[in-house]
């Protein structure tokens, strides 16, 4: 036993030594870079810029709420095809942020207010929450239910069903949905996977009360904290295709507004009317295809995505390996917002950048975070203020090499989340070196 302990200690010491020697090669993810201005062109830019004046919610959160809601509102009127499969503009979007500073709820509330002026009936009747079972979801978009009437000798309608098959599931406590899915026999995971796929039929196979929904169009907006997500998302859901149907979006407070101005209803109404006139009226319907330039761009991007994923391993791959489909759906939404009957290169470029933000969110979230290193954080900030940009090995030396790579990762990621530091690369004779500096 003593020899075994000595052997374990030997390997641990050598592993720690290798970590110290190679700390600059250890890739610590930072908070995803903000989306560029080109993402906010056209009507999307007008919406996000206007709403940002009246909320502390981040721009990315406002954007994703808006396009997810828009995609659900469109329904199955427009689609694109890949290998015979139809992709509709329904997105599953989860905003992930700290409970007190993420401003997840604020981002949804203000977008909902805008959309209420576009179509209040839709907001009141098509937005649902409390998803706890597959049966419950199907019920809200159910077909009419017939039962045999032995006296009349015919089937009679006992439930008229739901004519409008669009449903936006809003879950401010998405952690509860993940907890519910762990129960034996719960059908929620499988049904949501089928709903994202755009299956023509969703149904429950319960013996006594079978329910069926044809041509449903289901989208999701959910909110969850970093800690809850990592705790409640099981390995099964990571690898069975459930998690990679979602856009995971890191979100945090935007501008500080201690005394936010009142949302001007007249201006909000004008913006709602503009969305109606410039996006929703005479919107293209049916099959949306890529133009020739977009086809060429997509061919190169597709190869790039596949190659990049082949060089990755672990949980991250499982969570992002549906990137091609997400980019195409986002491209479709951008085309529809432009009232374009074809997907153009600009639409793919915007979709690609949004996806990269979501992909980087996944890398940031599932790399681990911690709040246990407050004193270390302050020392790093102080050193950056005094000395300027520092490499990861130089930061380690601030603590006499008492930190290992994993601990350093947690500290730097937390500082990055709080907009206190950012990373940069500087050229060297060999491989470029990553350094960390104060956030401008």
Image: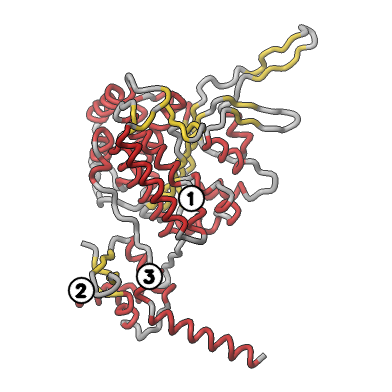
* Horizontal and vertical percent position of residue 266: 23, 27
State the SS at label 2: loop
Horizontal placement of 52 versus 303: left or right?
left
Q: Secondary structure at mark 1?
A: loop
Other-residue count near label 1 (Cα within 10 Å), few / some / many at <14 / 14–19 / ≥20: some
Q: Position of residue 138 (x, y in %)?
A: 60, 31
The residue furthest right is 150
Position of residue 364 relative to residue 133, above or below, is below
Of marks 2 and 3, which one's residue comes earlier in the chain? 2
Between the C-alphas of marks 2 and 1, the distance is 38 Å
Residue 407, image x and y in percent? 42, 74
> Mark number for residue 411?
3
Q: Quadrant of residue 309?
A: bottom left
Considering depth in this image, is 32 or 58 the residue closer to the camera?
32
Q: CA distance from mark 3 to mark 1?
A: 28 Å
User: Relative to the observer, which residue lies in front, 320 or 143?
Assistant: 320
Q: Quadrant of the C terminus?
A: bottom left
Marks 2 and 3, how far apart at CA: 18 Å
Q: Which disc is residue 388 wearing?
A: 2
Mark nearer the viewer, 2 or 1: 1
Judging by the rendered image, the residue that carries numbered circle 1 is 321
Mark 3: secondary structure: helix
Q: Earlier in the sequence, mark 3 or mark 1?
A: 1
> In the depicted view, which residue is nearer to us: 213 or 178?
213
Residue at point 26%, 40% (across, down): 40
In the image, is 437 to the left or to the right of 143?
left
The residue sitting at 60% across, 53% down in the picture is: 236
Residue 111 percent location from the top left of the image: 34, 36
């Amino acid at each position: 036993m003593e020899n075994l302990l000595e052997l374990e200690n030997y390997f641990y010491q050598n592993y720690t030594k290798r970590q110290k020697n190679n700390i600059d090669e250890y890739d610590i993810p930072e908070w995803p870079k903000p989306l560029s201005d080109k993402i906010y062109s056209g009507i999307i830019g007008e919406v996000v810029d206007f709403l940002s004046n009246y909320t502390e919610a981040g721009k990315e959160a406002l954007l994703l709420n808006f396009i997810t809601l828009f995609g659900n509102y469109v329904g199955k009127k427009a689609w694109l095809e890949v290998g015979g499969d139809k992709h509709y503009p329904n997105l599953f979007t989860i905003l992930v942020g700290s409970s007190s500073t993420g401003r997840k709820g604020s981002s949804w509330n203000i977008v909902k207010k805008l959309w209420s002026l576009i179509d209040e009936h839709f907001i009141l009747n098509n937005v649902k929450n409390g998803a706890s079972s597959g049966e419950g979801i199907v019920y809200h978009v159910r077909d009419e239910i017939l039962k045999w009437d032995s006296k009349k000798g015919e089937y009679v309608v006992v439930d008229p069903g739901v004519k409008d098959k669009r449903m936006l599931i809003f879950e401010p406590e998405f952690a509860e949905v993940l907890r519910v899915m762990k129960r034996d026999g719960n059908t929620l995971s499988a049904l949501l996977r089928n709903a994202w796929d755009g299956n023509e039929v969703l149904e429950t196979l319960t013996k006594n009360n079978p329910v069926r929904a044809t041509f449903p169009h289901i989208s999701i907006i959910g909110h969850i904290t970093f800690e809850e997500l990592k705790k409640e998302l099981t390995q099964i859901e990571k690898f069975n295709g459930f998690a990679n149907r979602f856009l995971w979006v890191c979100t945090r407070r935007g501008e500080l507004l201690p005394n936010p101005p009142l949302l001007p209803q007249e201006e909000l109404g004008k913006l709602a009317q503009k969305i109606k006139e410039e996006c929703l009226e005479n919107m293209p319907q049916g099959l949306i295809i890529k133009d020739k330039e977009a086809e060429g761009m997509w061919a190169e991007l597709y190869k790039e995505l596949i190659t990049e994923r082949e060089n990755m391993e672990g949980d991250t791959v499982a969570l992002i390996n549906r990137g091609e489909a997400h980019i195409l759906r986002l491209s479709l939404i951008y085309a529809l917002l432009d009232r374009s009957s074809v997907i153009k290169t600009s639409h793919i470029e915007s979709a690609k950048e949004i996806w990269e933000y979501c992909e980087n969110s996944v890398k940031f979230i599932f790399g681990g975070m911690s709040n246990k290193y407050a004193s270390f954080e302050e020392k790093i900030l102080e050193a950056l203020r005094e000395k300027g940009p520092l490499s990861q090995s130089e930061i380690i030396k601030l603590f006499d090499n008492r930190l290992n790579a994993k601990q350093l990762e947690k500290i730097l990621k937390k500082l990055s989340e709080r907009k206190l530091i950012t990373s940069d690369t500087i050229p060297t004779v060999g491989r470029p070196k990553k350094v960390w500096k104060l956030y401008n």
